[in-house]
Amino acid sequence: MLFRLHEQRDWIAELADIGYTDVWSSEANAADAFTPLALASAWAPTLRLRTDLVPAHTRGPALLAQSVATLCEAAPGRVAFGIGTSSNVIVENWNGIGFTEPYKQVRDMVSFLRSSFAGEKVSGTFGNSTVKGFKLGLRPSIEPPILIAALREGMLRLAGSHGDGAIINWLSADDAATVSDIVQRSAGGSLANPVKEVVARIFVAPSIDRETVLAMGRFAISAYLNVPVYAAFHDWLGRSEDLAEMWSLWREGDRKAALEAIPDKVVDELIVSGSPEQCREHIDRYAANGVTTTALAILPFGYNQEQYRQAIRDLAPR
Protein backbone atom coordinates (compact mmCIF):
# COMPACT_ATOMS: atom_id res chain seq x y z
CA MET A 1 0.00 0.00 0.00
CA LEU A 2 1.44 3.34 -1.04
CA PHE A 3 -0.37 5.39 1.60
CA ARG A 4 -2.20 4.85 4.85
CA LEU A 5 -5.99 4.83 5.16
CA HIS A 6 -6.08 8.02 7.18
CA GLU A 7 -4.17 9.79 4.39
CA GLN A 8 -6.67 8.95 1.67
CA ARG A 9 -9.46 11.47 2.32
CA ASP A 10 -8.33 14.00 -0.33
CA TRP A 11 -7.58 11.25 -2.83
CA ILE A 12 -11.03 9.68 -2.50
CA ALA A 13 -12.80 13.02 -2.72
CA GLU A 14 -10.85 13.89 -5.87
CA LEU A 15 -11.90 10.66 -7.59
CA ALA A 16 -15.49 11.84 -7.74
CA ASP A 17 -14.43 15.31 -8.91
CA ILE A 18 -12.47 13.95 -11.90
CA GLY A 19 -15.14 11.54 -13.10
CA TYR A 20 -14.68 8.19 -11.41
CA THR A 21 -17.93 6.52 -10.34
CA ASP A 22 -16.82 3.63 -8.09
CA VAL A 23 -14.26 2.77 -5.47
CA TRP A 24 -13.26 -0.84 -4.91
CA SER A 25 -11.79 -2.75 -2.00
CA SER A 26 -10.45 -6.26 -1.72
CA GLU A 27 -9.36 -8.58 1.04
CA ALA A 28 -6.07 -10.45 1.02
CA ASN A 29 -3.27 -9.44 3.41
CA ALA A 30 -3.72 -5.66 3.76
CA ALA A 31 -6.86 -3.78 4.82
CA ASP A 32 -10.13 -5.63 5.30
CA ALA A 33 -12.73 -5.12 2.61
CA PHE A 34 -15.22 -3.02 4.61
CA THR A 35 -13.34 -0.34 6.58
CA PRO A 36 -11.88 1.52 3.55
CA LEU A 37 -15.33 1.66 1.95
CA ALA A 38 -16.92 2.92 5.16
CA LEU A 39 -14.44 5.79 5.17
CA ALA A 40 -15.00 6.44 1.47
CA SER A 41 -18.74 6.56 2.03
CA ALA A 42 -18.27 9.67 4.16
CA TRP A 43 -15.43 11.23 2.18
CA ALA A 44 -17.15 10.98 -1.23
CA PRO A 45 -20.93 10.72 -0.86
CA THR A 46 -21.56 10.14 -4.58
CA LEU A 47 -19.22 7.22 -5.22
CA ARG A 48 -20.48 3.65 -5.41
CA LEU A 49 -18.82 1.29 -2.94
CA ARG A 50 -17.87 -2.18 -4.14
CA THR A 51 -15.94 -5.16 -2.80
CA ASP A 52 -13.72 -7.17 -5.13
CA LEU A 53 -13.70 -9.57 -3.46
CA VAL A 54 -14.55 -10.94 0.00
CA PRO A 55 -13.61 -14.63 0.33
CA ALA A 56 -16.62 -16.89 0.90
CA HIS A 57 -14.77 -19.11 3.40
CA THR A 58 -13.15 -16.69 5.83
CA ARG A 59 -16.18 -15.26 7.66
CA GLY A 60 -18.99 -17.19 9.25
CA PRO A 61 -22.42 -16.65 7.65
CA ALA A 62 -23.85 -14.43 10.41
CA LEU A 63 -20.77 -12.22 10.63
CA LEU A 64 -20.65 -11.83 6.86
CA ALA A 65 -24.31 -10.79 6.72
CA GLN A 66 -23.75 -8.26 9.51
CA SER A 67 -20.65 -6.81 7.81
CA VAL A 68 -22.42 -6.31 4.49
CA ALA A 69 -25.60 -4.97 6.08
CA THR A 70 -23.67 -2.45 8.19
CA LEU A 71 -21.92 -1.02 5.15
CA CYS A 72 -25.24 -0.86 3.30
CA GLU A 73 -26.78 1.14 6.13
CA ALA A 74 -23.82 3.52 6.15
CA ALA A 75 -24.38 4.24 2.46
CA PRO A 76 -27.88 3.18 1.37
CA GLY A 77 -28.15 2.30 -2.29
CA ARG A 78 -24.45 2.74 -3.01
CA VAL A 79 -23.08 -0.71 -2.11
CA ALA A 80 -22.45 -3.71 -4.34
CA PHE A 81 -21.07 -6.78 -2.62
CA GLY A 82 -18.52 -8.91 -4.45
CA ILE A 83 -17.90 -12.42 -3.13
CA GLY A 84 -15.75 -15.22 -4.48
CA THR A 85 -13.74 -18.33 -3.75
CA SER A 86 -10.45 -16.46 -3.33
CA SER A 87 -7.57 -18.99 -3.39
CA ASN A 88 -5.98 -21.76 -1.38
CA VAL A 89 -3.15 -19.37 -0.47
CA ILE A 90 -5.44 -16.88 1.26
CA VAL A 91 -7.99 -19.33 2.67
CA GLU A 92 -5.77 -22.22 3.74
CA ASN A 93 -2.26 -20.84 4.13
CA TRP A 94 -3.14 -17.50 5.69
CA ASN A 95 -6.43 -18.19 7.48
CA GLY A 96 -6.07 -21.87 8.36
CA ILE A 97 -9.45 -22.77 6.84
CA GLY A 98 -9.94 -25.69 4.49
CA PHE A 99 -10.35 -24.59 0.86
CA THR A 100 -13.06 -27.18 0.29
CA GLU A 101 -15.86 -27.18 -2.28
CA PRO A 102 -15.31 -23.53 -3.27
CA TYR A 103 -18.19 -23.47 -5.77
CA LYS A 104 -20.65 -24.76 -3.16
CA GLN A 105 -19.31 -22.36 -0.54
CA VAL A 106 -19.94 -19.32 -2.75
CA ARG A 107 -23.35 -20.55 -3.90
CA ASP A 108 -24.51 -21.27 -0.35
CA MET A 109 -23.22 -18.01 1.11
CA VAL A 110 -25.05 -16.05 -1.59
CA SER A 111 -28.22 -17.95 -0.73
CA PHE A 112 -27.73 -17.27 2.99
CA LEU A 113 -27.17 -13.56 2.42
CA ARG A 114 -30.29 -13.19 0.31
CA SER A 115 -32.42 -14.93 2.94
CA SER A 116 -30.89 -12.82 5.70
CA PHE A 117 -31.38 -9.55 3.84
CA ALA A 118 -35.02 -10.52 3.27
CA GLY A 119 -35.53 -10.67 7.05
CA GLU A 120 -35.96 -14.43 7.28
CA LYS A 121 -35.00 -16.50 10.29
CA VAL A 122 -32.42 -18.81 8.75
CA SER A 123 -31.42 -22.34 9.65
CA GLY A 124 -29.56 -24.90 7.62
CA THR A 125 -26.17 -25.92 6.31
CA PHE A 126 -24.40 -23.37 4.16
CA GLY A 127 -21.08 -24.54 2.80
CA ASN A 128 -18.84 -25.33 5.76
CA SER A 129 -21.24 -23.85 8.34
CA THR A 130 -24.41 -25.01 10.06
CA VAL A 131 -26.68 -22.12 11.05
CA LYS A 132 -29.43 -22.42 13.67
CA GLY A 133 -32.07 -19.72 13.92
CA PHE A 134 -30.14 -16.63 12.76
CA LYS A 135 -32.12 -13.48 12.01
CA LEU A 136 -30.34 -10.34 10.90
CA GLY A 137 -31.09 -7.51 13.30
CA LEU A 138 -29.98 -4.72 10.95
CA ARG A 139 -31.55 -5.36 7.57
CA PRO A 140 -30.32 -3.18 4.72
CA SER A 141 -32.96 -0.62 3.78
CA ILE A 142 -31.79 -1.13 0.20
CA GLU A 143 -30.49 -4.62 -0.54
CA PRO A 144 -27.15 -4.63 -2.36
CA PRO A 145 -26.55 -6.38 -5.65
CA ILE A 146 -24.34 -9.42 -5.15
CA LEU A 147 -21.57 -9.89 -7.68
CA ILE A 148 -19.80 -13.24 -7.91
CA ALA A 149 -16.11 -13.34 -8.78
CA ALA A 150 -15.70 -15.97 -11.45
CA LEU A 151 -13.01 -17.53 -13.57
CA ARG A 152 -14.10 -20.70 -15.34
CA GLU A 153 -17.42 -21.82 -16.74
CA GLY A 154 -19.09 -23.18 -13.59
CA MET A 155 -18.61 -20.01 -11.56
CA LEU A 156 -19.44 -17.82 -14.56
CA ARG A 157 -22.76 -19.61 -14.92
CA LEU A 158 -23.36 -19.26 -11.18
CA ALA A 159 -22.75 -15.51 -11.45
CA GLY A 160 -25.36 -15.29 -14.19
CA SER A 161 -27.96 -17.52 -12.57
CA HIS A 162 -27.56 -16.75 -8.83
CA GLY A 163 -25.74 -13.43 -8.76
CA ASP A 164 -26.54 -9.95 -9.97
CA GLY A 165 -23.43 -10.08 -12.10
CA ALA A 166 -19.85 -11.27 -12.31
CA ILE A 167 -16.43 -9.94 -11.42
CA ILE A 168 -13.77 -11.15 -13.84
CA ASN A 169 -10.04 -10.81 -13.42
CA TRP A 170 -6.66 -11.44 -15.07
CA LEU A 171 -7.83 -11.80 -18.63
CA SER A 172 -7.35 -10.09 -21.97
CA ALA A 173 -9.84 -7.94 -23.82
CA ASP A 174 -10.44 -10.83 -26.22
CA ASP A 175 -10.96 -13.25 -23.32
CA ALA A 176 -13.63 -10.89 -21.97
CA ALA A 177 -15.98 -11.80 -24.80
CA THR A 178 -15.71 -15.51 -23.96
CA VAL A 179 -16.48 -15.15 -20.26
CA SER A 180 -19.05 -12.35 -20.60
CA ASP A 181 -21.05 -14.42 -23.06
CA ILE A 182 -21.28 -17.31 -20.56
CA VAL A 183 -22.53 -14.96 -17.80
CA GLN A 184 -25.16 -13.33 -19.99
CA ARG A 185 -26.43 -16.57 -21.54
CA SER A 186 -26.77 -18.10 -18.07
CA ALA A 187 -29.10 -15.23 -17.20
CA GLY A 188 -31.15 -15.40 -20.38
CA GLY A 189 -29.33 -12.59 -22.16
CA SER A 190 -26.47 -12.30 -24.62
CA LEU A 191 -23.50 -10.10 -25.42
CA ALA A 192 -25.79 -8.03 -27.63
CA ASN A 193 -28.49 -7.94 -24.97
CA PRO A 194 -26.78 -7.93 -21.57
CA VAL A 195 -28.95 -8.48 -18.51
CA LYS A 196 -26.24 -8.77 -15.84
CA GLU A 197 -23.36 -6.56 -14.80
CA VAL A 198 -19.91 -7.82 -15.79
CA VAL A 199 -17.08 -6.12 -13.93
CA ALA A 200 -13.50 -6.52 -15.15
CA ARG A 201 -10.56 -5.80 -12.91
CA ILE A 202 -7.99 -4.51 -15.39
CA PHE A 203 -4.31 -4.15 -14.57
CA VAL A 204 -2.96 -0.91 -16.02
CA ALA A 205 0.62 0.25 -16.46
CA PRO A 206 0.38 3.86 -17.69
CA SER A 207 3.92 4.12 -19.00
CA ILE A 208 5.69 4.22 -22.36
CA ASP A 209 8.83 2.70 -20.80
CA ARG A 210 8.55 -0.67 -22.53
CA GLU A 211 11.22 -2.49 -20.53
CA THR A 212 9.79 -1.36 -17.19
CA VAL A 213 6.29 -2.40 -18.26
CA LEU A 214 7.51 -5.85 -19.28
CA ALA A 215 9.45 -6.32 -16.04
CA MET A 216 6.58 -5.18 -13.82
CA GLY A 217 4.06 -7.12 -15.88
CA ARG A 218 6.05 -10.35 -15.64
CA PHE A 219 6.37 -9.93 -11.87
CA ALA A 220 2.60 -9.43 -11.46
CA ILE A 221 1.71 -12.28 -13.82
CA SER A 222 4.01 -14.76 -12.09
CA ALA A 223 2.62 -13.82 -8.68
CA TYR A 224 -0.94 -14.64 -9.75
CA LEU A 225 -0.84 -17.17 -12.57
CA ASN A 226 1.14 -19.73 -10.57
CA VAL A 227 -1.69 -19.91 -8.02
CA PRO A 228 -3.63 -23.09 -8.92
CA VAL A 229 -7.01 -21.43 -9.57
CA TYR A 230 -5.46 -18.91 -11.98
CA ALA A 231 -3.25 -21.49 -13.65
CA ALA A 232 -6.34 -23.61 -14.34
CA PHE A 233 -8.16 -20.52 -15.64
CA HIS A 234 -5.48 -19.72 -18.19
CA ASP A 235 -5.16 -23.33 -19.21
CA TRP A 236 -8.93 -23.19 -19.89
CA LEU A 237 -8.51 -19.92 -21.84
CA GLY A 238 -5.93 -21.60 -24.07
CA ARG A 239 -2.64 -20.15 -22.76
CA SER A 240 -1.10 -23.43 -21.64
CA GLU A 241 1.43 -23.41 -24.50
CA ASP A 242 2.51 -19.83 -23.75
CA LEU A 243 2.77 -20.41 -20.00
CA ALA A 244 3.96 -24.03 -19.79
CA GLU A 245 7.63 -23.11 -19.40
CA MET A 246 6.89 -20.55 -16.69
CA TRP A 247 4.79 -23.06 -14.76
CA SER A 248 7.48 -25.74 -15.04
CA LEU A 249 10.33 -23.48 -13.90
CA TRP A 250 8.22 -22.09 -11.04
CA ARG A 251 7.51 -25.61 -9.76
CA GLU A 252 11.23 -26.35 -9.93
CA GLY A 253 11.93 -23.31 -7.76
CA ASP A 254 13.74 -21.22 -10.39
CA ARG A 255 11.70 -18.05 -9.98
CA LYS A 256 14.05 -15.81 -11.98
CA ALA A 257 13.96 -18.08 -15.02
CA ALA A 258 10.20 -18.46 -14.65
CA LEU A 259 9.71 -14.71 -14.99
CA GLU A 260 11.97 -14.58 -18.03
CA ALA A 261 9.96 -17.37 -19.66
CA ILE A 262 6.77 -15.29 -19.82
CA PRO A 263 6.35 -14.21 -23.47
CA ASP A 264 6.06 -10.50 -24.24
CA LYS A 265 2.71 -11.14 -25.93
CA VAL A 266 1.22 -12.48 -22.69
CA VAL A 267 2.23 -9.28 -20.88
CA ASP A 268 0.71 -7.22 -23.70
CA GLU A 269 -2.54 -9.21 -23.51
CA LEU A 270 -2.99 -9.08 -19.73
CA ILE A 271 -1.49 -5.69 -18.82
CA VAL A 272 -2.86 -2.48 -20.33
CA SER A 273 0.08 -0.16 -20.98
CA GLY A 274 1.27 2.86 -22.91
CA SER A 275 0.27 6.51 -22.82
CA PRO A 276 -2.98 7.43 -21.05
CA GLU A 277 -4.76 7.63 -24.42
CA GLN A 278 -3.39 4.24 -25.49
CA CYS A 279 -4.52 2.79 -22.18
CA ARG A 280 -8.03 4.19 -22.66
CA GLU A 281 -8.23 2.71 -26.16
CA HIS A 282 -7.20 -0.69 -24.79
CA ILE A 283 -9.71 -0.46 -21.93
CA ASP A 284 -12.44 0.38 -24.46
CA ARG A 285 -11.80 -3.02 -26.06
CA TYR A 286 -12.97 -4.69 -22.85
CA ALA A 287 -16.19 -2.68 -22.99
CA ALA A 288 -16.69 -3.69 -26.62
CA ASN A 289 -16.36 -7.34 -25.58
CA GLY A 290 -19.09 -7.42 -22.96
CA VAL A 291 -17.61 -5.72 -19.90
CA THR A 292 -20.14 -3.29 -18.43
CA THR A 293 -17.96 -1.91 -15.61
CA THR A 294 -14.19 -1.47 -15.59
CA ALA A 295 -12.23 -1.48 -12.33
CA LEU A 296 -8.70 -0.21 -12.88
CA ALA A 297 -5.81 -1.61 -10.85
CA ILE A 298 -2.79 0.60 -11.50
CA LEU A 299 0.55 -1.17 -11.15
CA PRO A 300 2.76 0.90 -8.83
CA PHE A 301 6.11 0.87 -10.71
CA GLY A 302 7.80 2.06 -7.54
CA TYR A 303 5.92 5.34 -7.88
CA ASN A 304 5.96 7.78 -5.02
CA GLN A 305 2.58 9.00 -3.83
CA GLU A 306 2.39 11.99 -6.15
CA GLN A 307 3.37 9.95 -9.22
CA TYR A 308 0.74 7.36 -8.38
CA ARG A 309 -1.87 10.05 -7.84
CA GLN A 310 -0.98 11.62 -11.18
CA ALA A 311 -1.46 8.25 -12.88
CA ILE A 312 -4.97 8.11 -11.41
CA ARG A 313 -5.67 11.57 -12.80
CA ASP A 314 -4.25 10.69 -16.21
CA LEU A 315 -6.54 7.67 -16.51
CA ALA A 316 -9.68 9.47 -15.32
CA PRO A 317 -12.77 9.07 -17.51
CA ARG A 318 -13.17 11.57 -20.31
Image (spheres, helix red, strand yellow):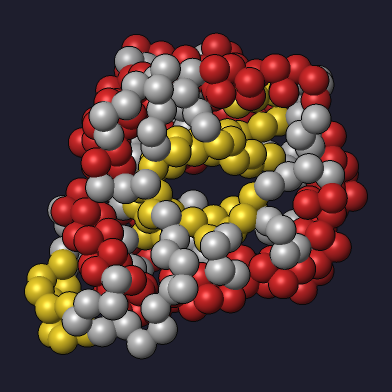
Instruction: Judge by depth and name the residue closer to the eye, 230 or 102.
Output: 102
- The relative height of residue 258 versus residue 241 in the rendered view (above or below) is below
Where is residue 258 shown, x and y percent of the image?
47, 27
**Left/right of residue 21 with respect to residue 196 in the rendered view:** right
**Left/right of residue 5 with respect to residue 61 in the rendered view:** right
Instruction: Judge by depth and name the residue closer to the eye, 72 or 261.
Output: 72
**Left/right of residue 196 with respect to residue 11 in the rendered view:** left
Q: Which residue is drawn at 19% across and 81% down?
A: 121
Quadrant housing the N terminus: bottom right
Image quadrant where residue 252 sits: top left
Instruction: Judge by depth and name the residue closer to the eye, 195 or 149.
Output: 195
Q: Which residue is drawn at 73% across and 45% down?
A: 20
Q: Which residue is drawn at 70% across and 17% down?
A: 281
Where is residue 254 shown, x and y percent of the image?
44, 33
Quadrant housing the C terminus: top right
- The relative height of residue 42 versus residue 127 in the rendered view (above or below) is below
Where is residue 124 shown, x and y percent of the image?
10, 74
Image quadrant where residue 109 sits: bottom left
Q: How many marks?
A: 0
